[in-house]
Amino acid sequence: MSASLSRRSLLALAAGSLAAPRARAAAGAKLKIGLLLPFSGTYAALGVNIADAMKLAAREHGGKLGGREIEWVQVDDESDPAKAPGNVNRLVVGEKVDILTGPVHSGVAMAMMQIVRQEKTLTIVTNAGAQAVTGTLCAPNVFRTSFSNWQVSYPCAEVMLKAGHKKAILMFWNYSFGQESMAAFKEGYSKGGGSIVKEIAVPFPNTEFQANLSEIASLKPDAVFVFFAGAGAAKFVKDYADAGLKGKIPLYGSGFLTEGVLGAAGPAAEGIKTTLHYAETLDNPANKKFREAFKKATARDADVYAVAGWDTIQALAQALDKVKGDTGAQKELIAALESVRLDSPRGAFRFSKAHNPVQDIYLRQVKGGQQVVLGVAQKGAEDPAAGCNLGK
Amino acid sequence: MTLSLFALQLLNGIEVGLLLFLVASGLTLVFGVLGVLNFAHGSFYMLGAYLAWWLAERTGGLIWAVLLGVPVMLALGWAVERFAISRLYRRDHLSQVLLTYGLVLLFNELQRTLFGNDVHGVPAPRALDWTVSLGEMQTWGAYRIFTSIACLCIAIGMRQIILGTRFGMRVRAGASNGEMLEALGVDVRRLFSVLFSIGTALAALAGMLAAPLTTVFPGMGESVLVVSFVVVVIGGIGSIKGAFAGAMLVGIADTFGKVLLPSISSAIVYAVMAAVLIFRPQGLFGEAQAR
């Protein structure tokens, strides 16, 4: 990587164009959008949904953004942080994409941040919820259209306190996502006067929960707040029901506990309440239109991941129209993105000063195999963006 | 920890151990008698689980899935032994690791193309869809109890076969001195084929029984494989009795580790293994070999 970088800067020096903007975007040139997403491995389904939603949104705009035709460049990031620097460089340095989008995995996002902060590539994070992306590592050229871990966990604390659950047990997979979720939840829960009876950290990706469930049964908290996702979430939800705790000790979590696992978890998931910035049953025209279009294009049901992909292109469309597709004018483009207002399937959407979405967080409950919206857990939730100086 | 919670956790540990035994018994048989370090053993567990899900969806129940799936896996085991493993008996462990690790990759890819990468739940048979309450709060699914009993029955059955039949005698002889067995006129090749098939089927059966408890997901084989090796090493290579004791020890240590020392819980199983190996390098029931 360093070799190619230095060779590139040498060439640039020789041409005497070091200070020139990286791409002289002729109006006719194609707009290169890089997709750094998992197309294989555990998160493949998520990556495919994001990519499909992006392409669907682009088609709605006639295949053009800001008057320029789009050229997609896809790289399978395999959700492997170790391969991330190489993959990011392939897109940023090799393909010289105008705009980089992705990834799903927070570890990959971290590696991506290191490079795009240096290369100043305009980047839109389409899923990874790591706090640092719009926190300590935030950058003018990096936006996020999904969520931060804080946003999907903090509001749940108030929901539980309002329901009268003053003593809670936390249980989570012990890696950054889980740790950040728990920290955000604890912040809200202790502020509201709740106390944490016990924190159970489960090594990732361990899914043998029985011993801890016996412990929960013996401690009898008012409620349990957990972070698990994917296979682990399905397993946990089933084990919780099998252990007879369902219906006795209410189970809460961030939305990822029940996202995409309802089929596998079956009736065991009924009644679980979670907080997230989206639910498939949200009753607004934008969501209806989006879900129909996605179903028609892919024959699959849209999910929270597809929403982020969809909104990525919608935001870009608005901003690029404003600068007439000139990605070389990055300052103006960033300002245009900052002023984007979207009527997203999730509701109203804008970027915060730290470039994270400001969005409503919904309280959802599983009923009849669907996420039913019970109400808004936090209106216009904005990540505190600790450690970010953007716009300050 | 109250006495009732202690008893509950002990039950949890035994349950984990019994299922683990089913996987590890096949591994120890193959390792002990054939001398093959079979990394693909976890893949057979994974394939069993996926097969259970796939067949249960199509035939209407887990029982049918097991009845159909076990013969399929017996055949797969036989084919793998015949066409791949059997060529490596005279080679060292490194070649075997290379081959069986290759099989792991192959089976993972097979799972991806045949069954996809989604997580699946498998419903327990309807007859076992009820719970037993234990303590004032907790209940146990009947299926969980059934699995434990089934594992225990299989363990007892294996013991009877190994100690009480001619086939079992050959297995024991093979474990302690294969060359002598061959010299005495036993068709060792056939014995190996049969044993490898049985080992494969045991792993697959464990996966099938575990499917309703653990859900079915990619990569489930690898995690089981590592723990199974620990069980085999603790128990002593080639010893079914050892595998049983090892599985119980690991299951119980793991369960109590999670509750009492959560911060280092993932290391406890290995600490137990290290402790056993310090005092009995050949494992609990292994025989010291002068090789």
Image (cartoon, rainbow, N blue to C red):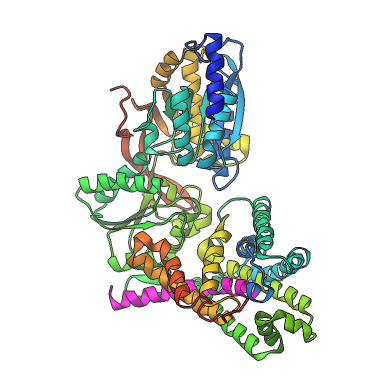
Q: Position of residue A321 (x, y in %)?
A: 50, 14
**Could you tell me residue B205's position as x and y percent?**
62, 70
Q: Tell me the residue at 64%/65% (across/down).
A: B38
Left or right, residue A13 beside residue B180: left
Q: Which corner quadrant of the image does residue A293 belong to?
A: top right
| Foreground of the two, B38 or B276 | B276
Q: Nearer the viewer, residue A21 or A305?
A: A21
The quarter of the picture where the C terminus of chain A appears is top left
Query: Is residue A315 something that shows in the picture?
Result: no
Q: Identify which residue is drawn at 70% across, 76% down.
A: B195
Farthest residue, direction left: A193
State whether residue B273 is above or below residue A347: below
Position of A143 compared to A299: left or right? left
Q: Is residue B7 magenta-colored?
A: yes
Number of marks present in the image shown = 0
Q: Quadrant of residue A153?
A: top left
In the rendered image, the quadrant that contains the N terminus of chain A is: top right
Q: Position of residue A55 (x, y in %)?
A: 59, 29
Residue A177 vs residue B72, the one in the foreground = A177
Res A309 seen here: yes
Report if residue B149 lies within the magenta region.
no
Please state the horizontal and vertical placement of residue A354, each as a whole percent of the image: 35, 27
Q: Which residues are magenta?
A: B1-29
Q: Residue furthest bottom?
A: B164
With respect to residue A363, does A203 lie above or below? Answer: below
Query: Magenta segment, principal secondary structure?
Result: helix
